[in-house]
Amino acid sequence: MPRQNHSNSFRAIVLMSMVTLLLSACTSWHPISTEAPAFPDRIRITTESLDRFELRDAVLVGDTAIEGSLRGGDPHSVRLVDIRLLELGQIDPGRTIPLVVGLVVGIPLGLGFACAAGLICGGL
């Protein structure tokens, strides 16, 4: 029975690692103008105080960008004059393709080594 718990933990770690890598490593950020009539679905803002955060579904109300969708808690908002850099996130194929290929090759290899070492399937 302890092997099953070990196996579930290993799978959870692999799954969380994949999701984290895919969400962060595949996105590249490109500057955009604060004078755009509408913001994209997701923007990253760097303020004059060098704080950095993302706004989803942002809308412009007066001189303030306000997050449109609530993800639990208060929405972020920032005045346009306090924005140092406004960026648009896009999927970058140059980063995504090597990552996916690495995961497709690396995960089976890792599982094979873990199995051979007796960590997840009783060993060879």
Image (spheres, rainbow, N blue to C red):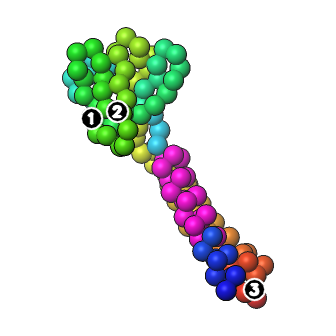
Quadrant of the image containing the N terminus: bottom right
Q: Nearer the viewer, mark 3 or mark 1?
A: 1
In the image, what residue occupies the spot 60% across and 74% down?
A: 8
Q: Are marks 1 and 2 in contact (CB under 8 Å)?
A: yes
**Which segment is the magenta one?**
10-26
Element type where label 3 sits in the image:
loop
The answer to if 87 sits in the magenta stretch is: no
Give the mark, 1 or 2, whose residue is nearer the N terminus.
Answer: 1
Query: From what the image shows, is residue 19 above or below residue 94?
Result: below
Q: Is residue 16 left or right of residue 77?
A: right
Label 3 – label 2 distance at C-alpha: 50 Å
Crowd tier of the residue under label 2, counting other residues whose Cα lies within 10 Å: few below 14, some 14–19, many 20 or above: some
Crowd tier of the residue under label 3, counting other residues whose Cα lies within 10 Å: few below 14, some 14–19, many 20 or above: few
Residue 68 — which label? 1
- Image coordinates of residue 58 in percent, x first then y, are 29, 31
Q: Is residue 53 left or right of residue 40?
A: right
The residue to which callout 2 is attached is 75
